[in-house]
Amino acid sequence: MTEMKDYVSFRAARGSINISEEVVAGVVSGAAAEVEGVSALYTSPVREFAEIMGKKGLSKGVKIRIEEDGISADVFVVTDGNISMAEMGKNVQQAVKSAVESTIGVSVINVNVHVCGLGK
């Protein structure tokens, strides 16, 4: 894997495969949202305002860093409080790692889970 700005890129015999950071963020947010205990992904009002003003916005509640040896993700969640936050966080980490590695084919270096609220 080589690094390009805003893309995960793979060299192939007949060219290259480029997967946008937006797609990676979508896979991460989809996996996280399906975990028991996650009520929603968190988006700050500042980020929502930036999106309204036309700034590039990745999937809500997710920040991706493309690195030379894989990707790192920060996932911002609101929990429903039905299971322990520690257990929910570990489950989010496992779900994200599994989804990204099987869907995109790139290693996940780490998944940082940030619990930003309690809701239903």
Image (cartoon, grey):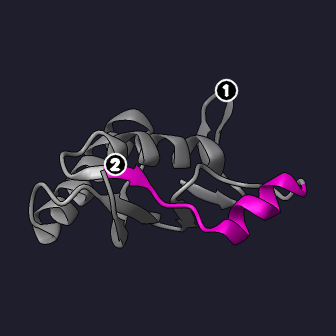
**CA neighbours of label 1 inside 10 A, class few (<14), some (14 to 19), many (20+):** few
Residue 14: quadrant of the picture: top right
What range of the chain is rendered magenta? 39-53
Give the left or right position of residue 80, taking residue 22 as reference: left
What is the x, y in percent for residue 117? 37, 69
Does the magenta segment cover residue 99? no
Q: Which residue is mark 2?
A: 32
Q: Is residue 93 left or right of residue 10?
A: left
Asked if marks 1 and 2 touch (Cβ < 8 Å), the reply is no
Q: Position of residue 47 (x, y in %)?
A: 70, 65
Who is closer to the viewer here, 120 or 5?
Answer: 120
Dot 2: element: helix
Please check the rendered image and state whether residue 46 is part of the magenta-colored stretch, yes or no.
Answer: yes
Q: Residue at x 57, y 53 (%)?
A: 60
Residue 74: quadrant of the picture:
bottom left
Q: Secondary structure at mark 1?
A: loop
> Which residue has dot 1 on it?
14
Which tag, 1 or 2, sits closer to the chain's start? 1
Q: Position of residue 56 (x, y in %)?
A: 80, 55
Res. 58 mark: none
Residue 37 in percent (x, y) is at 20, 52
Position of 118 compared to 53: left or right? left
Q: What's the residue at 9%, 66% (across, down)?
A: 84
Q: CA distance from mark 1 to mark 2?
A: 34 Å
